[in-house]
Image: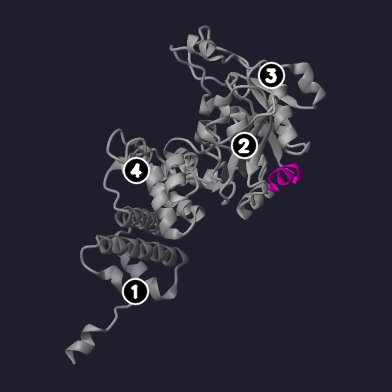
Amino acid sequence: MLKKIRHIKMPKDVGWLIPGLEVKRWFAIILLGSFLILFGILILLNIGILSWLLTFAKSTVNYISHELLAGGLIIAGIILFFLGWQKTNMSIMDLRTEKDRSSVLEILYRRRKLNRGPHIVAIGGGTGLSMLLKGIKRFTNNITAVVTVGDDGGSSGRLREELGVLPPGDIRNCLAALADDEDLVTQLFQYRFQNGEGLEGHSFGNLFLTALCSITGDMVSAVKESSKVLSIRGVVLPATLDDMKLAAKFEDGRIVRGESNIPEAGGVIKRLFTEPERCNPLPDVLTAIKGADLIILGPGSLYTSVIPNLLISGVADAIAASKAKKLYVCNIMTQPGETDDYTVSDHIKALIKHAGGKRIIDAVLVNDVLPNVISEGYAEAGSFPVVVDKDKLSSLNIEIISAKLIQENKSGLVRHSSNRVARVIYYWFKKNKK
């Protein structure tokens, strides 16, 4: 008999009455407030069953008018109702401090507003894409980051070679950039081991994604689970699940294989291609491009971060066919081994060429202000400001968006400001949408 009693299941709704939850008192206040509101309305309407209570109330406090008594009860009821409702929510979410409460209100407001933002697809890789995402997430939650998977250097290259996974480095950076709050968990995700046999040089996030990939079966599922841990805004997608490797043919006929080897080879790149030649796109990538309001290419290494995405079967076609606005964020400085002596129009011509001649760019965003002092390291490495050749851009029918995009710094380093880049893009998009 006792065994049967022990196995009787408690209804779910009754579970709210379990001692220690600290919500019953607030439920009681909600009920009291509701009762006072109802009672006030009934008095105001002079409902028959409450006439004797009204008569009693009038004889007790005959100096209070009928309407004033009803109004007072209703107001008191409303105050108690909302007090109980607020305290119940705070208790359920265990928000004990004013900071916690204001943070929740801010997050709720921000998410409601940002959920109505434009659908943006950002395509690229490396630090350029993660920089862009940090700024764009301030304007919308509807972000899809399409990340190249051609990396074969550093921690990503080692994991790719030893364990056969897609390189997780660029994906990790994008996840961290889109994290709702760059708190301790995000810092942990970006942590890089400085020593330790087999660990030195690896980042925790790369190892985490690799482990999840093994558990879930593929990188897409691993990224989805990681997104939940970091509470990211938007979606991060590898451009393909195929084992894509990059190769470049140079003007002198040489063919150099490996993403990390291409910039080191020296010379003028004639054509970039993948091995295998045909890599299948992730279906979600094509769906996101089709439904986008705005597609952004770059910034980042032209031949090793941006163009590789266009080489995946169907991606360039999907961009060209999309009704979205299409924008390229040009690099501020040339990159030795990839874009030596390139102007802005040279960057765009390379993109169009590798997209099969399709129109995949409507406008280009360029920086129009350089710091007074540029680090001597750039010139020593053979890196110079990218020249904005307006005449050639006009002949390509490309709109030029010119603005100050760099961060202020005293060291002479030229870096994009994520906030400035995102702000210029967003207001350009809004103006063109109208």
Can you identify the residue that label 1 sits on? 12
Which residue is tagged 4?
A: 185
Measured from the top left, where is residue 161 in percent x and y?
A: 46, 45
Q: Does dot 2 land on a helix, a strand or a loop?
A: strand
Q: Is residue 317 magenta?
A: yes
Front position among marks 2 and 3: 2
- Front residue of this view, candidates 134 and 216: 216
Spot occupied by residue 23 in the image (x, y as percentages of width and height): 28, 61
Which quarter of the rendered picture does the N terminus lie within?
Answer: bottom left
Residues drawn in magenta: 313-323
Which label's residue is closer to the chain start, 4 or 3? 4
Is residue 126 toward the left or the right of residue 50 in the image? right
Give the residue at x 62% y 49%: 285
Kind of residue at badge 2: Ala
> What is the crowding at mark 4: few (fewer than 14 residues within 10 Å), some, or many (at least 20)?
some
For marks 1 and 4 on the same chain, the one whose residue lies earlier in the sequence: 1
The residue located at (41%, 43%) in the rendering is 206
The numbered mark, 3 or 1, whose residue comes first in the sequence reads: 1
Q: Which residue is mark 3?
A: 343
